[in-house]
């Protein structure tokens, strides 16, 4: 479902202002695209954003995603070989990536914290994020190997 610009404004104006950012068409478009197409690369966000803002340049998309990631409105996910991906679901969750087609899925946090994710084992560093990336085959790639 596509959201209108009015919806985007209603949804993102407050978070942008709290983050000290001006509300711009570019930021609204990127935030909407990253919400409806989570785990997109900057290239993919550019493709989607051009539907709403035909003139938006890829360089602008890169500038905007870097700024939004810095301000905490976008989460950047570094997936090997496919480049950084972005999403607006910034709360804790892990990811699984298909090594065949690059599909990325969200993985809920386990109910109990495994010992390897216990931040107290890291000395002299304040841990802010623990990221786990599972590698495997998605259902459709696993099926195509049969
Ligand atoms: Zn796959
Ligand atoms: Zn995610």
Image (spheres, rainbow, N blue to C red):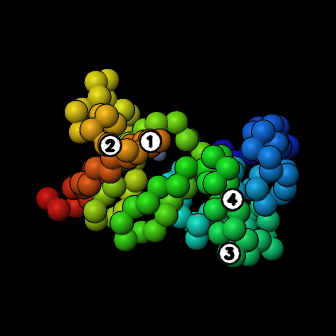
Q: Nearer the viewer, residue 103 or 107?
A: 107
- The answer to whether 18 is drawn above or below residue 60 in the figure is above
Identity of the residue drawn at 46% across and 36% down = 92
Indicate the secondary structure of the residue bearing disc 2: loop
Check disc 2: other Cα within 10 Å, few if <14, some if 14-19, many if 20+: few
Q: Residues within 10 Å of mark 4 (few under 14, many from 20)?
A: some
Q: Position of residue 39 (x, y in %)?
A: 50, 54
Residues at marks 2 and 4, CA–CA distance in whole angstroms:
30 Å
Q: Which residue is mark 3?
A: 58
Residue found 79% across the figure and 60% down from its top: 26
Measured Cα–Cα span from mark 2 to mark 3:
40 Å
Q: Nearer the viewer, residue 71 or 125?
A: 125
* Mark 4–mark 1 distance (CA, rounded to whole Å): 23 Å
Q: Is mark 2 within 8 Å of ligand 2?
A: no
**Mark 1 or mark 4, which is nearer the start of the sequence?**
4
Q: Is residue 4 visible?
A: no
Q: Earlier in the sequence, mark 4 or mark 3?
A: 3
As drawn, the label of residue 67 is 4
Q: Is residue 109 visible?
A: yes
The residue depicted at 29 percent of the width and 28 percent of the height is 113
Query: Marks 2/1: CA distance?
Result: 8 Å
Q: Nearer the viewer, residue 112 or 31?
A: 112
Marked residue nearer the N-terminal end (1 or 3): 3
Please identify the quarter of the rendering in which residue 97 is found: bottom left
- Taking the view exactly as shown, the residue that stands out farthest to the left is 146
* Label 1 secondary element: loop
**Image disc number at residue 123:** 2
The quarter of the displayed image where residue 144 is located: bottom left
Q: Which residue is mark 1?
A: 126
Q: Which secondary structure lies at badge 3? A: helix
- Cβ atoms under marks 4 and 1 closer than 8 Å: no
- Cα gap from disc 1 to disc 3, whole angstroms: 35 Å
């Amino acid at each position: 479902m596509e959201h209108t610009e009015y919806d985007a404004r209603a949804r993102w104006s407050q978070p942008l202002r709290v983050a000290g950012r001006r509300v711009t068409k570019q930021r609204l478009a990127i935030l909407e695209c990253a919400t409806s197409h989570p785990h997109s690369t900057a290239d993919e966000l550019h493709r989607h954003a051009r539907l709403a803002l035909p003139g938006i340049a890829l360089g602008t998309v890169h500038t905007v995603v870097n700024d939004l990631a810095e301000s905490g409105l976008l989460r950047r996910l570094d997936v090997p070989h496919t480049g950084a991906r972005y999403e607006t679901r910034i709360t804790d969750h892990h990811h699984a990536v298909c090594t065949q087609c690059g599909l990325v899925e969200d993985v809920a946090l386990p109910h109990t914290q495994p010992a390897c994710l216990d931040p107290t084992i890291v000395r002299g560093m304040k841990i802010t994020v623990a990221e786990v990336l599972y590698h495997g085959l998605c259902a459709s790639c696993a099926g195509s190997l049969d």
